Amino acid sequence: MSDSPNANSKWSKYKVEDDKLVRGEFCPDPRCGPGIFLAVHKDRKSCGKCGYTLLNDGKEAHKNF
Ligand SMILES: [Zn+2]
């Protein structure tokens, strides 16, 4: 058990970035659909096109621009 903590954090960082790419979500709004990705924020995901927002607690919010 002599694994370096630095090596571990490096791997977990890669894993997070890779995970983010793999599970990039499309906007469910019919105006956008597949092709428009949701921008990932710390506490929410949002669509820059229609304003659709999905909070991390599962609530959805729509902003009208
Ligand atoms: Zn959208």
Image (cartoon, grey):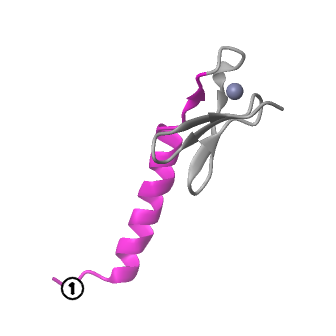
Whole-percent x and y of residue 1?
Answer: 15, 82
User: Please, what is the three-letter code of the amino acid marked with disc 1?
Assistant: Ser
- The residue lying toward the viewer, choosing from 58 and 16, is 58
**Residue 59 placement, left or right of 2:** right
Q: Is mark 1 within 8 Å of ligand 1?
A: no
Residue 18 part of the magenta segment: yes
| Badge 1 element | loop
**On screen, 21 above or below 30?**
below
Image side of residue 42 versus residue 18, left or right: right
Q: Main secondary structure of the magenta part?
A: helix
Of all residues, the one furthest to the top in this rendering is 30
Task: Give the residues drawn in magenta, as a range.
Answer: 1-28
Tag count in the figure? 1
Please name the residue shown 41% across and 73% down the image.
Answer: 9
Q: Where is residue 10, by image quadrant?
A: bottom left
The residue that mark 1 highlights is: 2
Q: Nearer the viewer, residue 44 or 23?
A: 44
- Look at the image and say whether residue 26 sits in the magenta stretch: yes
Q: Nearer the viewer, residue 61 or 26?
A: 61
Q: Residue furthest right?
A: 65
What residue lies at 58% left-to-right and 57% top-to-bottom? 42
Q: Position of residue 39 (x, y in %)?
A: 66, 43
Q: Is residue 30 above or below residue 49?
A: above
- The quarter of the image holding the C terminus is top right
Residue occupying image coordinates x 66% and y 23%: 35
Residue 65 falls left or right of residue 20:
right
> Counting other residues with Cα less than 10 Å from the Cα at mark 1, is it few (<14), some (14-19), or many (20 or more)?
few
Q: Residue furthest left?
A: 1
**Is 14 placed above or below 23 here?**
below
Residue under the point 34% across and 81% down: 5
**Within the displayed image, which quadrant is ligand 1 positioned in?**
top right
Q: Position of residue 57 (x, y in %)?
A: 45, 47
